[in-house]
Image (cartoon, coloured by chain):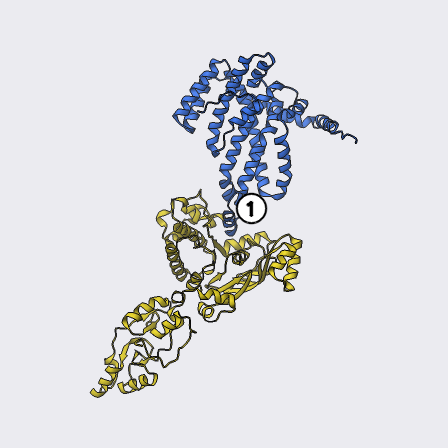
Chain colours: A yellow, B blue
């Protein structure tokens, strides 16, 4: 993977050019933002933000209103021209003075989705979705396949001839999404795209975005003020406060290790059971090999103090679960491998499943959940202790290994 | 305190223009005369029944049955007052000056809506044009173009052009910023932004400007009767000078009927406001308005 978006020390000051350069100097001297405002009348919207977004990454910029996240997003496609600093997209550094370069860059690499959708009311869904290609000079016949493909992906093919006002908010934003997808640009900038939607529709759209992202693997910078949304969507999250980037990290990193008091306050209110997924809280499985003898298996279980253990093949594929009582009985009967003793009805979870989804099964079945990948390889286990520790906000990571499995 | 010779300056400016720009005025005069005579031929020389039929059809298409019936009644009333020909020559003047005002006003409005500098230049000029009493325009118009239809069209143009400039500019500036950003984000050039996003969004506002410009043109064309433009203005003027209240009233009534018709036919364009009241206010006559 390589960085497709690179922002270096981007600062944006709103104000007259002369006052702005004074404000810029004051930023360098470390003068506080509101003091700069008082003395120069300039608003420091973005202050010295550096970050890079990898190709195929979904990066979420999180912050309250006025934190400069939307302004920073607009610096990335040059709609806002940074007062200082540089933005590089796919190796090309934006230069506001070269309008041709900027337009070419936007057409080829960048696309955007807006909070209020930004659809043209006098155009049909089809013509809205084809807007980006139309701007590039493609005839309606040339753009038809890409437009219909994009509308198909967001589930609006049947609505191609409708007008935006005939659609619900969620559907309108799907059109906005289709318009962005149709150009095929690798970078997608999303400015609070779901904030104007009802909670239920919002969740649906979040799932839809994750699905599209799995299919298409675009590079996305997603702006939101909702930390739950950020945690759900972001591969990495950047938290902005008063124009500055205060922390960048995965949701686990931010939850378990907030950079400062401000982030900690945010994190306090977060619904951890939804924000974190099984992959983040799982622990080492301590799995048994199917070729082991029952005596060895019991010894291993005694060592770690578990009453059951998952059993895998040599390639780490999950076979099932072995309970200690069955193993002990088998020793008496003189079995030489545990393969025949395995109970193959097990609770499994994908590493992307939110903790709350895993919790339901673990609570009712009273067994730990096996976290497996698509090839059924065992990645780790989630026990009831892990879940309770997560929700109560205790430090994450491998818990102490003396706690027993799901039956505690 | 010495008096500033502003009147003197204005005089010498106007006389400077009429001597040095004579060639330009000649060209303008030719163009106006040509356009006016075309419309005069169309409206005045055609049989009144044919013209009325066309008006009724337009009313039917734009607004529907009740408007069409009202148009028939209004037309018959004008014909009955023996003012049909006079009304048609006024309509020719309105359309001529309206077309010039729109042809100049819409591009100027677009320019003002696109650049800050154009806006700062155009704004005070518009303020000046709109607050100067309309009669004042008649004086240089006569000096440049002597009497008749041409100075009338010129003065009318000056009086009627501001609203369409203002409303075109306003329409462009009121386009939601998210739509403009959407255009920019997808790599639209300035021209594409204008044609594909701003103008379609500004259309209702521009059309409201068209409506108001045409209504102002009508009011000014009547005033221009004072400089020999003929038409209904001439009728009203004759009524005033002979103290013939009846003649003045019939002329005024014909103006009202025409104003209502033009307003109703053009307001649908942009859902524009009612300008009848201001037209009547300018005429300083207040017969009761019948709303169709």
Extreme left residue here?
A333
Extreme right residue here?
B2
The residue at the point 25 percent across, 75 percent down is A344
SS at mark 1 in the image: helix
Residue that label 1 marks: B190
Residue B7 placement (x, y as % from top left): 73, 27
- A286 and B56: which is toward the camera: A286
Residue A57 placement (x, y as % from top left): 46, 64
The residue at the point 48 percent across, 54 percent down is A112
What is the quadrant of the N terminus of chain B in the image? top right
Drawn side of residue B220 relative to residue A214, left or right? right
- A172 and A162: which is toward the camera: A172
Please say whether residue A2 is visible from this viewpoint: no
> Does residue A329 sit above or below B103 in this rendering?
below
Residue A310 placement (x, y as % from top left): 30, 78
Q: Chain of mark 1?
A: B
The residue at the point 44 percent across, 16 percent down is B76
Drawn side of residue B215 relative to residue A128, left or right? right
> Does residue A264 sit above or below B114 in this rendering?
below
Please rate how many residues cluster around mark 1, counting C-alpha atoms within 10 Å: few if below 14, some from 14 to 19, many from 20.
few
Q: How many marks?
A: 1
- B243 and A329: which is toward the camera: B243
What is the quadrant of the C terminus of chain B in the image? top left
| Occupied quadrant, residue B102 | top right
Residue B71 placement (x, y as % from top left): 44, 22
> Does residue A238 sit above or below A379 in this rendering?
above
> Does residue A18 sit above or below A366 in this rendering?
above
């Amino acid at each position: 993977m390589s960085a497709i978006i690179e922002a270096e020390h981007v600062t944006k000051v709103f104000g007259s050019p002369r006052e702005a350069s004074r404000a810029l100097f004051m930023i360098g001297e470390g003068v506080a933002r509101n003091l700069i405002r008082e003395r120069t009348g300039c608003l420091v919207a973005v202050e010295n933000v550096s970050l890079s977004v990898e190709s195929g990454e979904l990066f979420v910029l999180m912050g309250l209103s006025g934190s400069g996240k939307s302004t920073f997003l607009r610096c990335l496609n040059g709609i806002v021209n940074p007062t200082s600093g540089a933005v590089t997209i796919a190796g090309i550094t934006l230069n506001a003075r070269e309008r041709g370069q900027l337009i070419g860059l936007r057409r080829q690499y960048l696309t955007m989705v807006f909070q209020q959708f930004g659809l043209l009311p006098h155009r049909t869904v089809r013509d809205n979705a084809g807007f980006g290609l139309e701007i590039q000079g493609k005839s309606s016949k040339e753009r038809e396949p890409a437009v219909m493909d994009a509308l198909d992906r967001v589930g609006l093919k049947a609505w191609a001839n409708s007008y935006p006002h005939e659609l619900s908010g969620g559907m309108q934003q799907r059109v906005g999404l289709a318009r962005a997808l149709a150009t095929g640009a690798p970078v997608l900038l999303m400015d609070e795209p779901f904030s104007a939607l009802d909670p239920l529709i919002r969740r649906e759209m979040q799932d839809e975005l994750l699905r599209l992202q799995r299919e298409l693997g675009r590079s996305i910078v997603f702006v939101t003020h909702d930390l739950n949304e950020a945690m759900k969507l972001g591969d990495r999250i950047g938290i902005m406060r008063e124009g500055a980037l205060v922390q960048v990290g995965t949701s686990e990193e931010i939850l378990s290790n907030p950079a400062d008091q401000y982030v900690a306050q945010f994190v306090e209110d977060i619904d951890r059971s939804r924000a974190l997924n099984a992959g983040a809280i799982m622990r080492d499985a301590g799995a048994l090999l199917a070729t082991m003898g029952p005596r060895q298996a019991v010894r291993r279980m005694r060592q770690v103090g578990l009453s059951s253990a998952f059993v895998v093949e040599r390639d780490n594929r999950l076979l099932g679960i072995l309970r200690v009582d069955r193993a002990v009985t088998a020793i008496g009967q003189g079995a030489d491998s545990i393969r025949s003793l395995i109970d193959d009805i097990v609770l499994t979870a994908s590493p992307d499943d939110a903790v709350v989804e895993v919790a339901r099964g673990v609570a009712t079945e009273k067994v730990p959940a096996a976290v497996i990948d698509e090839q059924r390889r065992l990645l780790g286990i989630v026990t009831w202790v892990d879940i309770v520790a997560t929700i109560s906000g205790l430090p994450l990571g491998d818990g102490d290994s003396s706690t027993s499995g799901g039956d505690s | 305190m010495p008096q500033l010779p502003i009147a003197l300056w204005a005089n010498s400016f106007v006389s400077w223009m009429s001597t040095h720009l004579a060639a330009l005025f000649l060209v303008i005069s030719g163009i106006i005369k040509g356009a006016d005579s075309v419309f005069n031929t169309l409206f005045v020389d055609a049989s009144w029944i044919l013209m009325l039929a066309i008006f009724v059809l337009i009313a039917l298409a734009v607004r529907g049955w009740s408007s069409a019936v009202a148009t028939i009644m209004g037309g018959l009333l004008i014909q009955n007052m023996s003012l049909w020909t006079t009304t048609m020559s006024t309509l020719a003047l309105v359309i001529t000056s309206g077309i010039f005002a729109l042809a100049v006003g819409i591009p100027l409005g677009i320019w003002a809506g696109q650049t800050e500098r154009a806006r700062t230049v155009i704004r005070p000029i518009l303020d000046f044009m709109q607050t100067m009493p309309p009669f004042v325009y008649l004086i240089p118009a006569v000096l440049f173009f002597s009497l008749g239809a041409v100075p009338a069209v010129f003065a009318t143009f000056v009086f009627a052009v501001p609203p369409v400039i203002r409303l075109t500019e306003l329409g462009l500036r009121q386009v939601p910023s998210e739509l403009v950003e959407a255009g920019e984000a997808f790599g639209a050039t300035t021209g594409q932004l204008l044609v594909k996003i701003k103008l379609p969004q500004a259309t209702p506002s521009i059309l409201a400007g068209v409506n108001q410009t045409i209504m102002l043109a009508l009011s000014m064309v009547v005033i221009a009767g004072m400089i020999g433009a003929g038409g209904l203005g001439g009728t009203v003027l004759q009524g005033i000078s002979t103290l013939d209240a009846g003649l003045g009233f019939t002329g005024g009534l014909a103006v009202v009927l025409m104003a209502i018709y033009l307003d109703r036919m053009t307001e649908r364009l942009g859902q524009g406001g009612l300008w009848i009241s201001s037209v009547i206010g300018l005429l300083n006559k207040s017969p009761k308005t019948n709303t169709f």
